[in-house]
């Protein structure tokens, strides 16, 4: 490929310039832009070598660091395809990849809205618990599959969980006197393996999008698979409440929020942390009377205080959240154990779920 900038089809910042109707590699006809990020853009295409079927094409910026990162992502996607040829593990499938004038392009099955975008379009009204149950089961199944194959995703968040189909029905909510969107099919796929890390690879000090970042990452204690489980806990909370659990941009404030929600950080983690500047005499150096202190007190409360109902399934859900948001990574529940939690029993024994369904509707 050429260096960035000396290709007339590149914008200043290394993005490919394209318009609808453009055809790449005599094969991919661009229909629409689906999204963009620092890495580049994702476009919807017709794949004329696959009978004109709809696919998503991730077009990486023509810059060396993004090209290198894309090759790492391709390695991960290739591994996933090899280990899951029948697409049973809820991870997005790479179909093909190629280099187009210095732009690495990766084609995927076409998916729909992310669980975040759907929530946003629904005015941040939370998902019903029975839908969260199905989504959670698939997410944990996918992450369990990654961990079994020596991979940590490291960037799990609602934006990286996509519905396969986001058609919805409008349901009238008499309490709020408004209609809300109820997704028809909660089948999801995990996407964005750009930060996924194999066991044997270098583990970056800072990983994850801020709000979903585990305590061991903030304290620089080293991290592994359990950091994904912490992120899933934060995601499921967000589905349940419609807002982010840790709404902050500062490490010390983040730790203060954790303490308000989950109690004090364990001494062992504090003593081993490379971030002693956050602590004083073995306790978080935090002033509850400051502006930030008041913000955390107003914004956060102990986890159980967020229950929307005291129905059995809600209590089971919070028992599971508590195990996922365990400070000590070695004590945090693993994805394979999550799938055996009583919260998921209605999925395993649908015949017994009549009682559960009725109580579920009552609690909405």
Image (cartoon, rainbow, N blue to C red):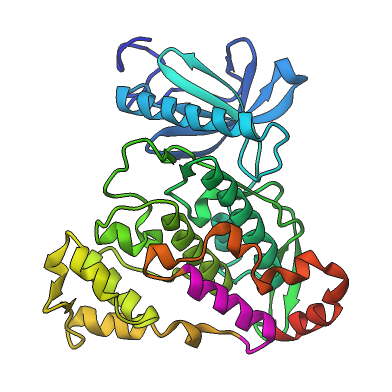
Residue 253 in sight here = no
Residue name at image x 75 percent, y 56 percent: 185
Q: What span is colored magenta in the figure?
A: 309-324
Instruction: Determine whether 277 is above or below 97 in the image.
Output: below
Task: Point out the image quarter for the N terminus.
Answer: top left
- Residue 158 image position (x, y, % from top left): 52, 56
Residue name at image x 39 percent, y 80 percent: 261
Left or right: residue 200 versus residue 121 is left
Left or right: residue 349 versus residue 84 is right
Left or right: residue 292 versus residue 224 is left
Per the image, is 320 magenta? yes
Residue name at image x 68 percent, y 74 percent: 342
Task: Point out the image quarter for the C terminus.
Answer: bottom right
Residue 304 in sight here = yes
Per the image, is 122 magenta? no
Quarter location, residue 7: top left
- Residue 180 image position (x, y, % from top left): 68, 70
Instruction: Determine whether 337 is above or below 77 in the image.
Output: below
Instruction: Determine whether 114 is above or below 25 in the image.
Output: below
């Amino acid at each position: 490929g050429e260096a960035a900038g000396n290709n007339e089809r590149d914008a200043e910042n290394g993005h490919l310039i394209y318009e609808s109707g453009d055809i790449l590699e005599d094969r991919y006809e661009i229909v629409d832009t689906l999204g963009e990020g620092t890495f580049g853009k994702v476009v919807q295409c017709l794949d004329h070598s696959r009978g004109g079927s709809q696919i998503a094409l991730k077009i990486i910026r023509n810059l060396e660091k993004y090209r290198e990162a894309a090759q790492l992502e391709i390695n991960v996607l290739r591994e996933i395809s090899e280990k899951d040829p029948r697409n049973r593990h809820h991870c997005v499938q790479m179909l093909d990849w190629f280099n187009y004038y210095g732009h690495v392009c990766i084609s995927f099955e076409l998916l729909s809205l992310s669980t975040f975008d759907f929530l946003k379009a629904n005015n941040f009204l939370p998902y019903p618990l029975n839908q969260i149950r199905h989504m959670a089961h698939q997410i944990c199944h996918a992450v369990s599959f990654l961990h079994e194959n020596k991979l940590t995703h490291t960037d799990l968040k609602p934006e990286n969980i996509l519905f396969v189909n986001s058609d919805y029905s409008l349901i009238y909510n008499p309490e709020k006197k408004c209609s809300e969107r109820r997704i028809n099919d909660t089948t999801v796929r995990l996407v964005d393996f750009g930060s996924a890390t194999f066991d044997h690879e270098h583990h970056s000090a800072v990983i994850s999008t801020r709000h979903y970042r585990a305590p061991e990452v903030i304290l620089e204690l080293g991290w592994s698979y359990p950091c994904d489980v912490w992120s899933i806990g934060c995601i499921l909370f967000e589905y349940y409440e419609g807002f982010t659990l840790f709404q902050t941009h500062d490490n010390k404030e983040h730790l203060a929020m954790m303490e308000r929600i989950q109690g004090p950080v364990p001494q062992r983690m504090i003593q081993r942390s490379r971030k002693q500047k956050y602590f004083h005499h073995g306790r978080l150096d935090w002033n509850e009377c400051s502006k930030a202190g008041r913000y955390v007190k107003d914004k956060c409360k102990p986890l159980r205080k967020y229950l929307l109902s005291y129905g059995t399934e809600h209590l089971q859900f919070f028992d599971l959240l508590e195990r996922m948001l365990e400070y000590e990574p070695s004590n945090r529940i693993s994805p394979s154990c999550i799938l055996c939690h009583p919260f998921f029993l209605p999925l395993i024994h649908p015949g017994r779920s009549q009682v559960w369904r009725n109580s579920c509707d009552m609690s909405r």
